[in-house]
Amino acid sequence: MSLAEPLRVYIDSLVHPSVQQDPLTATRHRAFIAPRLLGSLIALAAFPVYLAMRGVPSALEISVFAWLVIPILIAYYLSRTGRYEGAHILSSFSLTGLVFVVACKTGGISSFAAIWLVVVPLEAALSASRKVVAIASTFALAAAGILLVAQTLDVLPPSAIGDQAGLAALGIISASLYATGLALGAEALARTSFWLLYAEEDRYRLLARNMTDVITRHGRNGAVLFVSPAGETLFGARIKDLMGHGLFDRVHVSDRPAYLSALADAAQGEQQSVEFRVKRPQGKSESAIEFVWVEMRCRLLDRTPGGPGAREVVAVMRDVSDRKSQEQALEVARAESERANAAKTRFLATMSHELRTPLNAIIGFSEMLVNEEQMRLDAARRQEYARLINDSGNHLLAVVNGILDMSKMETGDFEITPEPFAPSRVISNCCDILALRAREAGLDLVLRNAENLPDIVADKRAFKQIMLNLLSNAIKFTDRGGRVIIASRLDGDRMVVSVEDNGVGISDADLPRIGNPFFQARSAYDRRHDGTGLGLSIVKGLVALHGGDMQVKSELGRGTTISIGLPLDCENGAARATNSAPPTSFELARRQTEIQVRKSA
């Protein structure tokens, strides 16, 4: 290890901790401490040699050597306080004082030492501070003025040195050499400053080129002055096309006010964050475009190149399309959860009504039958009570069967057994079953079966349940004196059956929800018509299992037409329906209810 390495380490240790993290300032501190500390120590070490060669020194010579302690103390002052400008001022003052004293003893303003006053402001220039240079120049000019006035008034003592010409040459040479050293030091500091700045810019350039976020600088009116290379990937455009108002032209029209407002507020000193959509080409095709979500965080630029009045804004942008998609998915999930909760509430409200009423009838009439006094009633009254109990039990069984069938369809456990049969006979049979109810309700039941209707391959029991549910609903929601028309026809490789009534109809607001489990149009606790709201849901599910579809057309106060389309061969439709759609509100309600039951348990 060379001798220079320990010296360098020692000089580095003298740098004040407050500036050690700033390479340029730390270099300035080292450049100030090293020459003063080492120069003074070397000069003091040479003092014995000087005495051996010179003999007994004069008072002036002793003063000069004693002054060499001052630079050491100033270097120590900078090391302890870190006050760079204050150390330079003390150094200028001490050098000016030394030159003034020597000049007073050696001829005043014409002394060989007076030329060193020129060095004082040059040394101060290394501080890169106008304040220090001005103070050092004031020291030098004041000392020169005092020497000039004192020499003019002839108040200075006679020169203690005879050979003024030789000393003048020595003073000029030494001052020139010292000034040369100062110039080399200034050049070294400038070179260090350049390389440090270049290294810092290179780091930022490397960071800007490799980071996925886009860095932009905006001037007046939001015009883009700089875009990092990542902008080409994010915006799908060349950098030069984004300059000026090129980026603004790509912002979605409805998001432009928010974009400009964020930049304007940031120019006033407030940090802003805004999300907006930006247009960019989709894939390699320039004709196809897509909008991506971009998050922009912007603030006022600390040191604006154009001065304080320019007020430029720096912004960081990133693609947040994935996060937006996740937020939308969460919003859909939340809406689905709310829908499930509403379905659960509707399920509980409907079940409480549909179960309580027949259970109350069964309990009440059965208690009357077991009562001794009621047993004395005639056989007709007892038979009526027994019939009411039977009807209530059948109603409960129908409700439970409907719930079970709907649950099986929702979970994919409902199985259909396709078989060939004549649909016209099933439709006629269903009309015969409900003909009595239609007559009691004062309705006309009209059947219009197509003559050329062929046999179909489907689940006969399921088809019969579909027709019974449709006819029951039509009869239930049609006022006395109305008419229900059942029509069937062949449509290519499909059979279409429609049930039309001129009953109460369905409002436009309720029409999209028809077919949802437990939903009844104009449903309320005081609704006019009994029922669970499962009829059309079961129809919709059974039709879907056969690979068919259901359409509902209705007008409030004019009537409703429900049409179902079934393929003539439903075996393929049943296979396709195995992969059922996402859970509907019934399944969600059932799951929500199970969760609530588990929590309460």
Image (tube, rainbow, N blue to C red):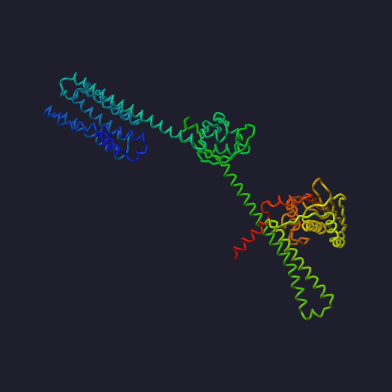
Q: Of residues 372 and 448, which is closer to you in this image?
A: 448
Q: Of residues 482 and 43, which is closer to you in this image?
A: 482
* Observer able to see residue 121: no
Task: Give the quarter of the figure containing the N terminus.
Answer: top left
Give the side of residue 287 with respect to residue 296, left or right: right
Q: Look at the picture and state if 427 lies above or below 282.
A: below
Q: Of residues 98 and 437, which is closer to you in this image?
A: 437
The image position of residue 141, as x and y in percent, is 29, 26
The image position of residue 520, as x and y in percent, is 75, 57
Give the side of residue 449 with respect to residue 105, left or right: right
The image position of residue 263, as x and y in percent, is 54, 37
* Observer able to see residue 426: yes
Q: In the current view of this chain or complex, which residue is farthest to the front?
A: 420
Q: Quadrant of residue 407?
A: bottom right
Give the side of residue 500 with respect to residue 600, left or right: right
The image position of residue 69, as x and y in percent, is 22, 34
Q: Quadrant of residue 397?
A: bottom right
Task: Give the quarter of the figure containing the C terminus.
Answer: bottom right
Give the side of residue 173 with respect to residue 364, left or right: left
Q: Of residues 115 and 23, which is closer to you in this image?
A: 23
Give the residue displayed 23% in from the left and 31% down from the top.
39
Q: Quadrant of residue 78?
A: top left
Give the residue displayed 73% in from the left and 69% down from the top.
359
